[in-house]
Image (cartoon, helix red, strand yellow):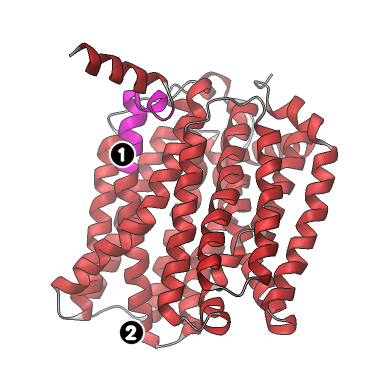
Amino acid sequence: MSRLSNLLAFLSTHGMGRALRHRDYTLYAIFGWFSNIGLWVQRVAVQGLTWSLTESYAWLGAVAFAEGLVTVFVMPLAGTYADRVDRLWLAKLTQVGSMIVAGMLAVLILTDQITLPILIALMMLSGVVEGFWTPVRLGMAPNLVPREDLSAALGISATLFNVAQFVGPMVAALFFTAFALPKEQYGYAIAFNSLTFLSYLVALSLIKLNDETLENRSRGGSFFEDFWQGLSYIAGTKGLRTYLFLMLMAALCMRPFRELFAGISEDIFNRGVDGLTILTTATGIGAVLGSLAVANFSKVNGAIKIMIVFLAADILLQIWFAYNKDFWIAVGLAAAMGFAITYPSINGQVLIQSAIRGEMRGRVMGLWGIVMRGGLPTGAIILGALSSLAGFQDALLIVTAVFIAVLIYVTTRRQLLVTLLEKPPK
């Protein structure tokens, strides 16, 4: 028994266990993972539904773009609002909204009332809710764990999110197998997602935020005064501004390769959909390992140096990937690239969460959400257009060269980033 007690004590003070020893964070993470599974089930179902309504790749992209575009536009205002109200209350409200939207969509599908315009409208409404939820979600972990356990908490959240990307489609496949009619397959799958939001709502009702912003939150200013104050804070904080620029360029130049796996698999390796699945899975495995690495790296000090090393390694991997002609080497490179870009992306959130003042958290994390949510599809469009003009290899080398220049610039300002981001906020 003493050995077991010693083991449990060790796990609670090392690595990911540092975050899981906090009851409220554990509830938040576990039920959040369950909700993310439902989210991926719905994403698969919506894709299938869109295809059944249109049989058009263009409409598949349009439905996804409609939701994402609304989310990106809403997030800056939502981040400001999150700094003016009780974040836990707003989190519960977004779960109710998501549950209602998913429930409405499920009912319309099951009753044969769904049409493409209605689907797009509901996806845009879902984007509005997600726009409010994202800055709240990103800002919640620091209010559930102390600063020294933040990297573990964010690493766990990212790991569970990446694992949900594997589990969600498998759960969706169970609905597709269990029911014969498309309306039942898609309808019940989305209804399942609605129930996951209900379970998350229950979990949020059981936790309490250690919210330093309750005392520091602005009481007298108007909404737009707070909004511009947030923009001024971001623009006036040199280290923060530089780091957000770095992560935006990473999202534009170093992440979009995975969005072209379908073309890479077919045109370069002649592997078709099987190659697409293998490459995507390999990248996901790398991303999970990157998340676990962040979760088990407890120090903020030294994080800038480590991230520059990882980004430099990612540059070399991406150049190798561009020149490589062997499929299985490409699989290994995809996994390594998934790891190399995930580590700085998540650890970047740790740095920002640790460095910003609590009353600015919603506004800053709203901008962070725009960078991470908007950068990837924008970069994919750019890389896809360049690939059509110059070929995939040259296109990947061009965007890599751009990022090399950015990383060199940021490296010259590394000491400033260390000074401003690796210290507690004043």
Can you say whether 49 is above or below 352 in the image?
below
Where is residue 299? Give x, y as percent. Answer: 58, 25
216 or 55: nearer the eye? 55
Say few, some or many: other residues with alpha carbon within 10 Å of mark 1 (under 14 / 14 to 19 / 20 or more): some
Quadrant of the rendered structure where residue 115 is? bottom left
Sequence-wise first label, 1 or 2: 1
Kind of element beneath mark 1: helix
Quarter of the picture containing the C terminus is top right
Can you say whether 290 is above or below 190 in the image?
above
Where is residue 312? Give x, y as percent. Answer: 71, 48
The residue to which callout 1 is attached is 30
Q: Is residue 63 left or right of residue 409?
A: left
Quarter of the picture containing the N terminus is top left
> What is the three-letter code of the residue carrying label 1?
Ile
Quadrant of the rendered structure where residue 319 is? bottom right
Tell me what residue is drawn at x 61 percent, y 26 percent. Answer: 300
Q: Is residue 18 left or right of residue 77?
A: left
Tell me what residue is drawn at x 65 percent, y 24 percent. Answer: 301
Tell me what residue is drawn at x 79 percent, y 60 percent. Answer: 402
Q: Which residues are magenta?
A: 15-32
The residue to which callout 2 is attached is 52
